[in-house]
Amino acid sequence: MERMLMKGNEALAESAIRAGCKCFFGYPITPQTEISAYMAKRMPKVGGVFLQAESEIAAINMVYGCASSGIRCMTSSSSPGISLKGEGVSYIAGSDLPAVIVNVMRGGPGLGGIQPSQSDYWQATRALGHGDFQIIVYAPSSVQEMADYMGKAFDMADKFRMPALILADGLLGQMMEPVVFEDKEIKMSDASEKPWATNGHGNKRPHNIVNSLYLQADELEQYNVERFKRYEKVKEELPELESYLCDDAEIVVAAYGSVARIAKAAVEQARAEGIKAGLARPITLYPYPEKELKTACKTAKKVLVTEMSMGQMVDDVRLALECRLPVEFFGRTGGVVPKPSEILAKIKEMKGAE
Amino acid sequence: MPDFNKPHALTDVPLHYCPGCTHGIVHRLVAEVIDEMEIEGDTIGICPVGCSVMAYDYFNCDMIEAAHGRAPAVATGVKRANPDKFVFTYQGDGDLAAIGTAETVHAATRGENITVIFINNTTYGMTGGQMAPTTLPGQVTQTTPYGRNTDIEGFPVKVCEILSQVSGVALAERVTVTDPANIRKAKAAIRKGFEFQKNKQGFSLIEVLSTCPTNWGKSPVESLEWLKENMIPYFPLGVYKEGAIR
Amino acid sequence: MSKMIVEFDTCKGCGLCTTACPKKIVEIQHEKLNKKGYYTAVCIDNDACIACTMCAMMCPECAIIIRGGEK
């Protein structure tokens, strides 16, 4: 086991390499640039490829090409850059290719700011591009999880032949924490287990085609229906939620990513003050851990959703709970990080209103 | 004289192109080069949005369909992961010289070892004949109904001339397919591009002046004449840059 | 045996082959439509054909194959 002190962005990059990610295609944007810088240093040493593209659009299309040839590859960006990648993500999903994308979120809309934010939740879980598709979305909450879920994202992307997104934020990307990596020989991926890959047929098989164009409406419908059947399996297998002190909780706070850590402190303070509070932290944002959230809220009278946005995941909480519990929201946005005391105040206000 | 057969690198799928469209000729030339170099099993072709978007059905090598303008980036992704494979893109003028200008120029500046087949027919064929970046001054299209006015719509993009100034380019050559003599030259240029790629000597682009009889409103034979009289004077044929960069 | 063989249903009757023939013996026939609805190219004088392959080179459809040239 190797224990290192690393920034979240670096841990994520190192973990990708250890997962066999052979090619990284990036473009500078704050606050994710350390990923590119780390890859630029490390990739040539391990037989991988680092390439700084001319734009985020080019980078995601390089991922599309590389993934087509059956090689593990990724790109990373921050909010405005992720918007540019939407077209490519849609093509990757439409062509049933595995690839990993990282969004280290910053405030928006527009150019927004460079401080941490969670205001791309809707984009990540609803519409990272045009058309009928979903992508797997992981929301790590520590530097260790940045590393752990990076590897998992590659495995699940391969398993279900769909893009996977690590949805982090500037706070997680920039903070340093100890992180443990398993001892494992670094082995770059190849296309040996991807019979669909367009890497040259070698005169041994018919030609492969990577494509998302279907001009016949019923054919396109059939492909989309098949893809959504696969999503049903994803929904069975992947949902993850961490629940903390929820067994007897009257007020459950739902939060993901770095905000979940702040909410955890608020929950602990609430407990210290005699309020039965708990924390439900979704780790997968797609598929949303609906059952797990319901279980976490089984003794709850009220649910508080906290986010670094004007309220986006709150929709999914209401949907998951089928509006059977009152759901309130507290958030800071624009790059402002909520304080534990602010969340605690909201918990107390909700408790007091009972 | 040898027999003349369809190359193996083309499938038996009937082409969807309009009668007299020269796409079919250029497809065949690329396929003949692949056959002659015996690289079908090691070749990956990329066809982005445009009339040739369905070329994945026509070539027998592995094929990728790409977003509009992005083929050189997609090709870069394939090539960087598989440096010993042959990668070509097949792009039209709107794709390569308008929406995909950045991807084209930067793949060229990086000296990516890929071969770009660039079809210049001065029009957006697939969408019904709108002004392209290569539409000639005065040329009537659906979106320049009074003729391309350079005061309003600007001037045609001369791709080979631009790329001749780019350090990563090993080959920038403009050819046409109006007659057997030019078809032979076009094929030789495509072969050269693939040879540069084989030796990892830099980016190669072969611009093929082509016809679009349907959207030009001319017969296929008249279109060949129109190309010779109007396009070649504006886009002179020839080698604009040639030489290994590495 | 004919040297210029036109795949009847593949030909789109565009006429490009007619411009390339040095012997001027390739024409578009106007008697029978193929299944796509085109009148197709034909060689009107097999004996005069020198199997130079120029018609085939001009054909965008790969509809022309050439056989029986000089060995």
Image: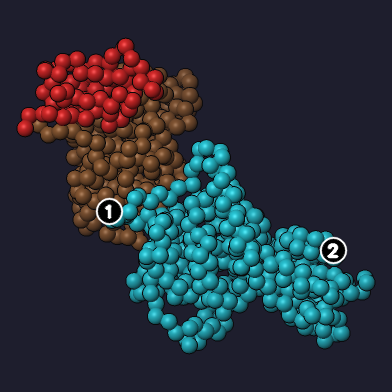
Chain colours: A cyan, B brown, C red
Q: Residues within 10 Å of mark 2 (few under 14, many from 20)?
A: few
Nearer to us in this view, B80 or A232: A232
Q: Which mark is residue A203?
A: 1
Nearer to us in this view, B240 or B61: B61
Which residue shows up at 32% across the image and 48% down it?
B61
At which x and y percent is residue B213? 37, 23
Which residue shows up at 77% across the image and 81% down it?
A245
Residue A248 vs B200, above or below: the answer is: below
Observer-side mark, 1 or 2, equals: 1
Which chain hosts label 2? Answer: A
Which residue shows up at 76% across the image and 72% down it?
A295
Q: Secondary structure at mark 1?
A: loop
Q: Of all residues shown, which one is farthest toward the front?
A: C1
Residue C67 vs A238, above or below: the answer is: above
Q: Which mark is residue A324?
A: 2
Which chain hosts label 1? Answer: A
Q: Is residue B234 left or right of residue A223?
A: left
Q: Is residue A186 left or right of residue B177?
A: right
Which residue shows up at 59% across the image and 49% down it?
A225
Please give the count of numbered marks on the rendered protein: 2
Residue A341 vs B32, above or below: the answer is: below
Q: Secondary structure at mark 2?
A: loop
Q: Specify whether residue A138 is in view.
A: yes
At which x and y percent is residue A38? 44, 72
